[in-house]
Amino acid sequence: MAQRVHDVAIIGGGVVGCAIAHELGRSRARTVLLEQAADVGFGTSKANSGIIHGGHQAAPTTLKGHLEWLGNRMWGDLCIELGFGFARVGGLTVALRDDELPALDKLQHQAATKGVPGVERWGRAALRRAEPNLTKQAIAAVYSPTTAVINPYEACFGLAASAARSGVEVRTLSPVTALAHDGELWVITTPTGLVRARFVLNAAGTAAARISALAGAGTYRMSFRKGEEYLLDKRLRGLVGRVIYPCPSATSKGTLVIPTYDGTIMVGPTADEVADPDDLATTADGAARVIAAARRLVPGISERDVIAEFAGVRAVVDGDDFRIGATGAPGFFDVAGIQSPGLTAAPAIAVMVADLLRGAGLDLTPAAGDGRLAPLPPLPPFVHFAGSSTARRQELAAADPRYAHIVCRCEYVTEAEVCHAIERGAHTLDGVKFRTRAGMGRCQGGFCTSRCMALLAREMGVPLTAVTKRGGDSWLVLDRGQVVQR
Amino acid sequence: MTASYLCIGCPLGCRLEVDDDPGGDILEVRGFSCRKGKEFAAQEHVDPRRSVTTTVALLGADLCRLPVKTAATVPKALVRDVCRALRAVRVIAPVQAGQVVLHDVLGTGVDVVATRAVAAG
Amino acid sequence: MISDRPHLLRSEYDVAIVGGGPAGLGAAVAAREAGAQRVLVVDRDTEAGGVLLQCIHSGFGLHRFGEELTGPEYAQRVLCEALDDGVDVVTEAFVLDVAADHALTIASPRHGVVTVQARATVLAMGARERTHSAIRIPGDRPAGVFTAGLAQRLVNIDGVLPGRRVAILGSGDIGLIMARRLTLEGVEVVGVFELLPHPNGLSRNIVQCLHDFDIPLHLSTTVVGIHGRDRIQRVTVAPVDETLQPLMQRAWEVPCDTLLVSVGLIPENELSQQLRLRIDPATMGPVVASTMETSRDGLFACGNVVHIHDLVDFVSAEAELAGRHAGRYATGQATPADNVRLLPGANVGYCVPHTVSTDRDHVVYLRVRTMFDPCLLRLRTPDGTVVHERKLRYVAPAEMVNLKLRPALLQGFHGDSLIVEVVPR
């Protein structure tokens, strides 16, 4: 196969890689996004808490603190452009003891330094009124109206779909196995073929240090911090209206109570150092700690309410800040160590990286005005039957009968949505699940799994046995002939 | 000698006991709550038998598997062999409930029949 | 088969029934017999019959039809009865909403999103399976973890197999049935692991599904870890102590590529909750009167949506009751209200119905909390007067107890509540 030379190869299709792809998609640069998994956003991003932090959470003296507030202000426009859900629900950092009050002072000071508007101190009475299910032990809180929630995987899908539409090549199932500079171009080996590019962006998340070493771009220590998250039954919808933070510790924001964009309450994450970046196992101990910590903030939460759980691993580089910039290797940039508030910062990281590339000689024509590249036309929004009014449902069904065929009985996902998800790049059961919510409800796929598998097989023209949960060796079913017959 | 069995005739699950003499003749059956239970115990003691339900390949219909059963019980030792024999069977829709899909399976004298109707699709 | 191709969907019905399994179809027939002219059954699948269509094993119908049928045979009989009676059975249709005035919003590719007005409604949505999330097994989240019922559908309807080497968590009947089913398909079933010290399924299934095939059953043992990045590679299992806490130092590893979870069913109660029906926390289904009427007028419920039954035969009996009273309600025939509340007492988890009348015959279904050998089933007043007693040979949580309650049994009783208890003899 003849290889087109790319200007930029982005290694890693997490939210950072996708945001960069989307940003570069606004230019004429020839860009390829290489993702090792079956779908973008299937690594650390999928397991993210989905919070767009208020802008005041990280210290202004750090890069992450700087990019947090820049990124926060960009998500509102992005979600309109890309058609995914975004809600500025606001956040509350809650103090339970007098000795936690200085932490609140610090947050307010950070807000003032960065110019984050509307951040204010609330006392008991205001807390009681706004969040009646919050613990009565809460003595004060810092409220931030800028805090928002999104579905992180939806953001990845939207960013990647938009990038693809504007000519970025999005290549999944393409882990980088070798990487070398031939004096002029980078030659990147993947199972889906060789890629040649002038610039390489290392946005490989937990694999970034390995990729950097592979490229001879320098070695650095990376540690891995696992976070377990627990989703609670829909019954608890509305338990809290804002993202509830405890007062932060040195290494983490602590365990939060999060009203997700979908309305489900989520609690987590933990922050435990692990040796293996692929260790995505939840633990009995983690669950106990998360529930106990969540109960300190919102006593109405119980272990019995947990309907699903997952874990993600954050990549941390020494110094605990983002590592973004040129390296010892020509044209090779690190975009590494993107721990919290990485999701919040992602759009700002993308702009920063585009500036770095421009500075290195890549031709990116900026639009007039804010100096950013010209925005892309909006993606058509993904229609969700469940959130539609009866009149709208009738319209949808009249135009396309597949909208009247319920495939997921818990989340009311229709055949039309599953088919659209497949058209937009879902090739796996999880790809469908995270685009449509089919399988995320109470029955956890008991009803819809075989139905979604059948639709995937039909739409992709493959047998049922070729459908996987999330690519790789995550096969789901076998033919009778594949089972050794005794 | 006394042997114990658990009756599979109905959900009651009676605990059955069978006494026999050294020649193997049954002397007494205990623990049953119905005639069928008594018969089951005696049968289970000398020649355990089971009904078999499984599916066979179905062509020419929306469904790809046809549920079937043995029309009567077969020796317990042959249950797996019956299923193995049915792996080669292909049925073409339409099918009537009760239609024989395999005559005299493994020479047991028992037919295998469809347990549902399927229209050609 | 039986042509249940949906014909017309009218805009008005006497009785509308949500769910076309044995409960819904049985209720439809009974509603017709009680005088309802127009009866609708709405089913979400491509054909009516419910979960019976994937239950290809036999063991159904001994009570109702006097012979042992397979699931598809039982389904075919009840569906034919409904169609012969002129019931409209609309398939591939999903009830999105039931309003308190019996207006049903239905989504169907054939009809679009439409509203149907009924005079009475019967909820017959059946049950869903408890998932492994509900029991929370820590570990990885690889492919290859299925509920037993989903595996049953994959094998019996979709014609594929879930794996080569299967471990089963929970000794519920569906898990036991699947242990045999998979073995007969050439799949290796490495064992069934049950948290409790006694099996959760019927003893006949322990014998004919496990013993017959030498499949080990590990009681007081549970799965404490799931391992495998893409596809499940193995599970960690551990014995549990009397308080059901795993003894990790005695844990061991079981290589397998599939884990089936068979940890019970719960009523499919989304619509019941949307309607804000009174729910019994023990059954997780709606509270019902002896007519199977819920806490809303003209809204009836039957089958697994009310409580989980052991046998479809009992579902059919309950459906007949609900259908008859829904038909009567829709046609303006009154049934006198109940006058006695039934309260679960010692060792009784729940009883259904929740109220009865001293003037009519009833069957009360109850489930005990723990196993007893010889024991007494007793009805008594709150102040301790014994009204009725019956000897039972053996009770277990896995096996529903039926109590036939006749007016004669309650002669001389004048109170408004009765405690139902099961005590050792």
Image: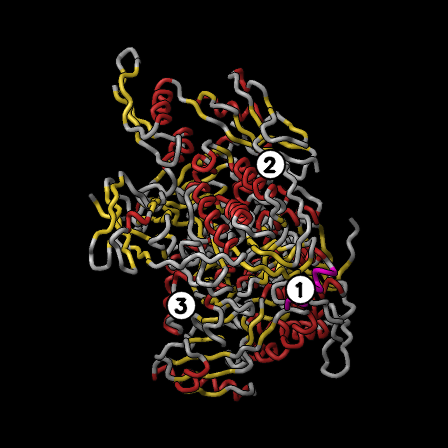
Q: Establish whether labels 2 and 3 are both on one chain.
A: yes
Q: Give the class, few, some or many, for how many residues have Cα within 10 Å of label 2's Cα (few <14, many ≥20).
A: some
- In percent of width and height, residue C176 lies at 43, 38
- Which residue has dot 2 on it? A479
Viewer-nearest of labels 1 and 2?
A: 1
Q: Which mark is residue A248?
A: none
Viewer-nearest of labels 1 and 3?
A: 1
- The residue positioned farthest toward the top in the image shown: B23
Q: Is residue C195 above or below residue C417?
A: above
- Which residue has dot 3 on it? A301
Q: Earlier in the sequence, mark 2 or mark 3?
A: 3
What's the CA distance linking mark 1 and mark 2? 38 Å
Do the numbered discs 1 and 2 sit on residues whose CB atoms are within 8 Å? no
Q: Earlier in the sequence, mark 1 or mark 3?
A: 3
Q: Earlier in the sequence, mark 1 or mark 2?
A: 1
Q: At numbered mark 2, what does the secondary structure look like: helix, strand or loop?
A: loop
- In percent of width and height, residue A194 lies at 71, 52
Span highlighted in magenta in the image: A389-399
Residue located 58% across and 70% down the image:
A150
- Which residue has dot 1 on it? A393
Q: Is residue C361 left or right of residue C322?
A: left
Identify the amino acid type marked 2. Asp
Figure label count: 3
Q: Is residue C424 above or below residue C10?
A: above
Q: Establish whether labels 1 and 3 are both on one chain.
A: yes
The secondary structure making up most of the magenta span is helix
Q: Is residue A264 above or below residue C379?
A: below
What's the CA distance linking mark 2 and mark 3? 44 Å
